[in-house]
Amino acid sequence: MNDYIVRATAADAQIRAFAAVTTDLTEEARTRHQTSPVATAALGRLLTGGVMMGSMMKNPEDVLTLQVKCGGPIGGLTVTADARGHVKGYVNNPEVMLPPKNGKLDVGGALGQGILNVIKDMGLKEPYSGQTILQTGEIAEDLTYYFAASEQVPSSVGLGVLMNRDNTVHCAGGFIVQVMPFVEERVLRQLEENIAGMKSVTAMLDGGHSPEEMLFQVLSGMEVEITDTMPAVFDCSCSRKRIEKAIISIGKKEIEDMIADGKPIEVKCHFCNTAYEFTMEELKEILEKCNRP
Ligand SMILES: [Zn+2]
């Protein structure tokens, strides 16, 4: 696994920036969920945004969820990340196929109209939640809009996934640049100029640029300090025990019905697509657990 996130500040902390290479974790998501190219691109972009946004949180136990509810044929996406570079996610319709638009995978068309829900569970009574309308459905623009509208932090987000001819992931990654309220006009101008003159994320990654080099391009002409780097991985914390708890939570009646069907059941984790099988014997044991006071 070679994926990682870089964090940096620039221009005397007037800017904070994040960049990531996420090729391996996007490919892992693709193989786990058997996503079509456009679904891989959509999910890879959201995973990349999510893992960087996760790294903005303070505590190791904090959990960030990005949820897209949309009317397009992909049906929706969900990504969850923590503050330590772990990320997981899925799309509702992994097999969605669309003709390319302007020679590119039509992620905006796959999502269509919808909303982006950002939920941060930081161990407080109520999780923080912010909701914005999708701007283009291309995800980077939608996250940019979220930061401006919901968090009041002017940001620039670039995300990209490039596929190989055989529909595996060639490269994936992105960056998030945010300006602080006390930013000077000339720093802002420089940043806008840099972004306007930059190649796309996929062109940079494909050209062999590292996340650090991406940041040096976005922040060109400024003093940049890389504050830390952290590995990024597709990671799901599901287990047999957790799935068992989920079965218990659906109630005795449902479990009795499953047993009456006389067949073992298979339960798949949404996030990582791991299948857990429960035999009749095991279902009966689970029912026992429900019956215990
Ligand atoms: Zn899982």
Image (cartoon, rainbow, N blue to C red):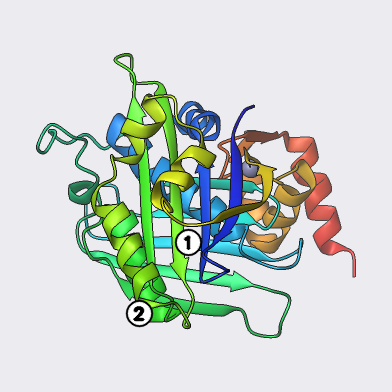
Q: Which residue matches tag 2?
A: 149
Give 151 or 286, whichever is nearer the viewer: 151
Left or right of residue 165: residue 246: right
Measure how far apart labels 1 and 2 are at the Cα level. Answer: 16 Å
> Would residue 94 be visible to someone looking at this image?
no
Callout 1: CB less than 8 Å from ligand 1: no
Residue 165 image position (x, y, % from top left) = 29, 15
Left or right of residue 136: residue 30: right
Quadrant of the displayed image that contains ligand 1:
top right
Q: Quadrant of residue 125?
A: bottom right
Q: Residues within 10 Å of mark 2 (few under 14, many from 20)?
A: some
Residue sitting farthest toward the top: 166
Q: Residue at x 40, y 51 (%)?
A: 218
Q: Which residue matches tag 1?
A: 66
Q: Is residue 125 above or below residue 74?
A: below
Q: Which quadrant would the C terminus be assigned to in this image? A: bottom right
Residue sitting farthest toward the left: 102
Residue 226 image position (x, y, % from top left) = 63, 50
Q: Residue at x 46, y 53 (%)?
A: 49
Residue 231 image position (x, y, % from top left) = 67, 40
> Would residue 201 be visible to someone looking at this image?
yes
